[in-house]
Amino acid sequence: MAGWLRGRTKLAAILGLLKDQTAAGLARASGPFSHLQFAIVMATNHHESLPEEKYVEEILATGSGSRMQVSFCTQLLVKRLNKTQNWAVAVKCLVILHRSILDGGFLFQDLLAYSSIRQGKEYLSFARFRYDQASADMDLCFWVKNYAKYLDERLRCSHALKTHLDNRWKGEVTQSRVEFMESGELLYQLEALQDLLQELYLCEPEGEAGEHPVIQGALVLVVMDSYKLQDEIRIRIKEMLGRVTTLELSESLAVLHNCKRADIQMQALQTFLENCKELRLLSDIPLPKKPIVSKLEIHKLTETIQSLQKEPSAPSYTRSTSTGGKVLAGGIPPRIPLENTARKPFRIEGPGNLTRTSSQPMSHLPRRAPGTNGSTLSREFPYVPEDRPHTRHSSANLIDLSFDTDSSNVERSRAPPNTFRDLITF
């Protein structure tokens, strides 16, 4: 018996078999999408083996169907993941979700990305999943937890990239998209990709987890993502290095930080792939030969930033200790501002003053004034009405209330038009 089978009791295997048979019977009896529900139950059973490919293909085929069908499939997978307490069922659910992102089509990608936004952080975390630290399954359960965190980070990275990582895309397609992006958006995407790379090499199996075939089957998908992830980071760093001369100092420092972080992560990824190469299913994986960023590029970027920091900044005012006045940093005195002279009014030579104040009426100003070359300047005054005494009007002047009429003798059609006292009763 293999080492990863130690600690498995016959009672646990019998209970798992009974649960699978019960769930399969309920799935057949369910109404809508019964065939899909049955395929999910059979693909994520309690048997410690890889899910059967025929059921996985049936699940992935729903990606070409209706949106309602795909939504039902993803909800059922996530529900089964959150309710299970068995590591084999959990890792099979995660593997099917991972394959649905890669091969399921646009509807699977869109619905999983939207659901992760709506549910928030740790969308694929199974809260009820508990394990005893002294049990033999501790290494397996710990790896499943890390795998779920990686898939969560993959969905969050798709929000930053506005698309999912797809191995079928060529580097030229990504390069053409990156060239027209702003520097701030590129830095944001670069940080999201490096966070995903950090979660990726944390999925290295330890102990008995590396010997289990189910873990190795899921690890193949993670290793396939690593190559596409390296290309995405390399393309964006190359684009940012080409823009260094046009970047601000803060953006250049961010690029330097990302380059150093990429160099450290590349070493950790190299170790991760070398350890995975020792496993049976991953013995023929290629190792990366070209680094993401070279040491020479990091050194040149550091020198460029240091030269930018040594450049003189704009002149600033400093307080002089001797005179108490303000002088420039280079010793040049500041330019003296012009005196604030009062605005002089416009005057025309001749008798009378043509200046007008707010308190002087226009009727007091002279109508004519001599101009140049014997001409005469004249002005026309607008019509000014006579000053009339202000009278205070009352409502009695507007409406005649003195007309006394008996309301009992007034018909509706013969009521006086200006009589309100008789028409209004209080």
Image (spheres, rainbow, N blue to C red):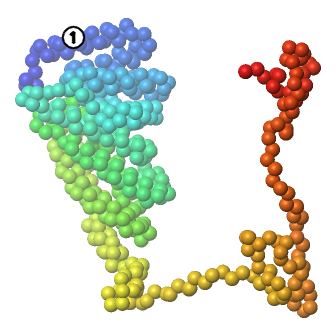
Asked if residue 409 lies left or right of residue 348, the reply is right
Q: Is residue 42 above or below residue 258?
A: above
Q: Position of residue 135 (x, y in %)?
A: 8, 27
Disc 1 is placed on an element classified as: helix
Residue for point 29% across, 48% down = 195
Asked if residue 252 lies left or right of residue 350, the reply is left
Q: Residue under label 1, please give it.
A: 18
Q: Is residue 348 above or below residue 236?
A: below
Residue for point 81% across, 53% down = 390
Residue 147 placement: quadrant: top left
Asked if residue 278 lies left or right of residue 89, the reply is left
Asked if residue 304 lies left or right of residue 412, the reply is left
| Figure quadrant of the C terminus | top right
Q: Is residue 120 above or below residue 32?
A: below
Residue for point 88% across, 87% down = 370
| Figure quadrant of the N terminus | top left
Q: Position of residue 138 (x, y in %)?
A: 12, 31
Q: How many marks?
A: 1
Q: Position of residue 296 (x, y in %)?
A: 28, 69
Q: Amino acid at mark 1?
A: Leu
Q: Is residue 5 above or below residue 16?
A: below
Whether residue 290 is visible: no
153 or 108: which is nearer to us?
Answer: 153
Crowding near pointer 1: few (<14 within 10 Å), some, many (20+)?
A: few
Whether residue 306 is visible: yes
Residue for point 26% across, 21% down = 83
Q: Position of residue 151 (x, y in %)?
A: 31, 37
